[in-house]
Amino acid sequence: MRTLRIVLPLLASASTALCLASVDKPKFVGWIVDASCPAIKRKQLSGKVDNLTPSDVQNLRLYAGQSVRATKSGTVNLLLHGHKTPLTPRDGWVLLKENPNSVTKGQSIYPEFVSPAGQEKGKSASPEAIWRRMSLLSLQTPANAKDLRVQLRIKPVDAQGKPKAKVPIVNGLVAIKHGDPVVVEISNDSSIPLYISLVDIDRVANVEILSPQAPATEVLVPAKSKWTRLPSPFYMSVPSGFDSGIEHFKVIASTHRINLSRLATKGMTDQAESVKPISDPLAYLLKACGTEDTLANPGRWTTAQQDFLVQSK
């Protein structure tokens, strides 16, 4: 995660059935990672049943008071209170509770998102932060946007902003020292202009929106193999207590304006109301984080990601 924040101007630029019963003002406890089934059902307290598909339930949020059951052959993979929890028909109904100690099945993922310094202070990434991180990293260009394409690359630079002649590679990743600057270059290889957003995601579930800080107001013009450099560098840092960490820069390019600011984990609030499943995972992510409707419809979109290693000096 960056140690220095710079506000950038945006450049032109087998079947399983699942039943969920909701309650008032629920507490977020986890989500469905995926399901090996062609159709899924969700039942609400009103008795209404939603017929869903696996694409509808990927990263679907779950709340205390809901009940989950796999009723036919197949598996529903959940992540509850930080535990990877697969459900099969033999498990019957599982009531989701607020108490994290209620989950005893499955491997805990929390150690993956806690630094030694955080462990000493009793701090850990919240389920909400981990959900946002995993939802962002799992985004892939949908089938209706295969004609759209953007590319993203980072370049370590010196104090004068010039690319370094030699860049170390560790396990196939560009290695950057703590406190060193990098520049970001984006190429829009599509035949239409796209709105651009850039997100930084680190190993302890910190999510920061690098650009824009407000809803997209400019368009990245198609450049066909030409790279456009963002004008200011980003200074990289290793999370406290770690010697190194893999970090991810992700660009999301959409045909409609969107606002990713509610996805940032700093100062985040958990949304109390459950959101209706949406086949578009980006639109669902935006709405689940409370983005206003006018800026939560990306239209068609594509994405690109650059992973790199940040090392302490």
Image (cartoon, rainbow, N blue to C red):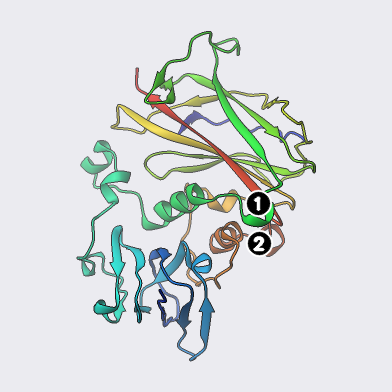
Please tell me how crowded label 1 is: few (under 14), some (14-19), or many (20+) other residues with Cα within 10 Å: many
Reply above or below: 177 against 102.
above
Reply above or below: 129 against 280.
above
Q: Position of residue 302 (x, y in %)?
A: 64, 47
Of the numbered discs in the image, which one, if any, rests on residue 112?
Answer: none
Q: Pick whichever of labels 1 and 2 is earlier in the sequence.
A: 1
Q: Position of residue 165 (x, y in %)?
A: 53, 8
What number of labels is visible?
A: 2
Reply above or below: 214 against 17.
above
Q: Nearer the viewer, residue 228 or 240?
A: 228
Amino acid type shown at disc 1: Asn
Secondary structure beneath label 1: loop
Apparent side of residue 133 relative to residue 194 in the rendered image (left or right): left
The single residue placed furthest to the front in the displayed view is: 14
Please tell me how crowded label 2 is: few (under 14), some (14-19), or many (20+) other residues with Cα within 10 Å: few
Q: Nearer the viewer, residue 130 or 282?
A: 282
Q: Position of residue 96 (x, y in %)?
A: 32, 74
Amino acid type shown at disc 2: Glu
Of the numbered discs in the image, which one, if any, rests on residue 292?
Answer: 2
Q: CA distance from mark 1 to mark 2?
A: 8 Å
Secondary structure beneath label 2: loop
- Are dots 1 and 2 in contact, CB under 8 Å? yes
* Residue in view at x 27 percent, y 41 percent: 118
* Residue in view at x 50 percent, y 72 percent: 274
Q: Nearer the viewer, residue 108 or 121?
A: 108
Asked which quadrant contains residue 289, the reply is: bottom right
Asked which quadrant contains residue 179, the reply is: top left
Of the numbered discs in the image, which one, if any, rests on residue 259?
Answer: 1
* Residue in view at x 55 percent, y 31 percent: 5
